[in-house]
Structures are given as C-alpha cells and as structure tokens.
C-alpha cells in the first residue's frame, strides 16, 4: 500500500520535511491538530494539556495496551496562526532524543483538499538519522490515515 505521507530527508542535513495532502478542508485539518478530543483519537494518546496560543504548551501521554505509560511528549508553541501555521518544540521524556523544532504549515488546495507540511529540525544529523531508523515513516502514515478517517466523520 502506498504511503501518502511523504518524508524528504536529504543526506547530511539535520532536518526532514513531511508532506501530506488530505481530502479535508483546511479548517478541518487544522482542527485535527488543535482540538484535544480529535488529537487524542488520531494520535492514540491522552492529551493532558493543549494550549493553542503563542507561548502555550502541550503535554501528551501515550500508554501501551496494558495501561503502562510508554512515553510523555511535550513542547512549547512559539507561533500560532489559525488555519495557517503552528511553530512548536517537541520533546519525548526519558528518551535519548533532544527537543526538536517543528514548523507546521496548513495550506488550502481546494475547498475540499488541503496540505500539511511539517519542517522538522533536529539537534544533529545523527539524531535525525536515529529517528529515521525507527519505524517513523510507517507510524506517521498510520497516524495521518487515522486523522483522515476520523475527521472525515466531522464533514
């Protein structure tokens, strides 16, 4: 099955660019990133905090099937422009990975289609390569597929 979420990782760079086109109006795509109930569904996580504003912050807690906390992810929102962009940090507690910087851009393609571009910058090329060695591409594709399916129901 073709992966709809594309990851561009140029050799020797400490960044990646993730793109995905959705069969959703840009308003609904953006809503999927800012509404705690929707975020929890498509990310498969518990949203402990989500302050959608400049200088806001967020905390997500993901558990395994037995209910044990697998990881906690958190960050600070540096820029928030409704239906256009979110600039934030992302950090997973109790992992060897440093915080990363994420630039999320939401683009209207048509009234019913939109595009998400995520420009992610890591501390080093080595860290970026470690992330890419994980089942990262598969995971983000699965999450974005869930996002599409869940938000389709809101149309």
Image (cartoon, helix red, strand yellow):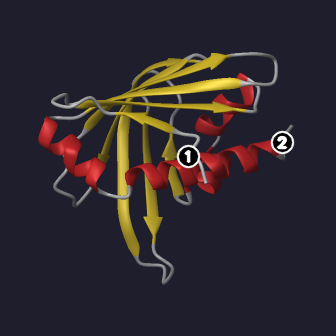
Dot 1 corresponds to which residue?
3
Camera-near label (2 vs 1) is: 1
Task: Answer left or right for 111 relative to 107.
Answer: right
Considering only vertical position in the picture, is 95 above or below 89? below
In primary-sequence order, the first of circles 2 and 1 is: 1
Task: Using a 10 Å C-alpha cutoff, classify the residue at mark 1 as few (fewer than 14 neighbours), some (14 to 19) or many (20 or more).
Answer: some
Give the labeled residue for mark 2.
Answer: 154
Badge 2 marks a residue whose secondary structure is: loop
Q: Foreground: 112 or 100? A: 112
| Residue 91 percent across, percent down from the top left | 29, 45
Side (left or right) of 67 relative to 134 = right
Give the spatial CA distance, label 2 vs label 1. Answer: 23 Å
Q: Is residue 69 left or right of residue 154?
A: left
| Residue 11 in view here | yes
Residue drawn at (74%, 24%) of the image: 113
- Which residue is painted at 65% across and 40% down in the image? 35
Q: In which quadrant is the C terminus drawn?
A: top right
Q: Residue at x 70, y 44 (%)?
A: 148
* Residue that sits furthest to the front in the current view: 1
Q: In the displayed structure, does residue 79 sit left or right of residue 23?
A: left
Q: Residues within 10 Å of mark 2 (few under 14, many from 20)?
A: few
| Position of residue 48 measured from the top left corner of the image (x, y, whole percent) | 49, 53
Report whether residue 92 is seen: no
């Amino acid at each position: 099955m073709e992966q709809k979420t594309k990851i561009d990782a140029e050799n020797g760079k400490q960044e990646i660019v993730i793109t995905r086109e959705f069969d959703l109006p840009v308003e609904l795509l953006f809503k999927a990133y800012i509404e705690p109930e929707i975020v929890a569904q498509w990310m498969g996580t518990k949203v402990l905090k989500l302050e959608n504003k400049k200088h806001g912050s967020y905390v997500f807690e993901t558990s395994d099937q037995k209910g044990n906390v697998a990881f906690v992810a958190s960050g600070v929102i540096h820029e928030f422009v409704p239906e256009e962009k979110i600039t934030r940090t992302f950090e997973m507690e109790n992992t060897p990975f440093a915080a990363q910087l994420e630039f999320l851009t939401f683009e209207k393609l048509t009234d019913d289609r939109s595009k998400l571009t995520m420009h992610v910058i890591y501390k080093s090329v080595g860290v970026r390569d470690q992330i890419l060695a994980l089942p990262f591409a598969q995971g983000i594709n699965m999450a974005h597929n869930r996002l599409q399916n869940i938000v389709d129901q809101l149309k």
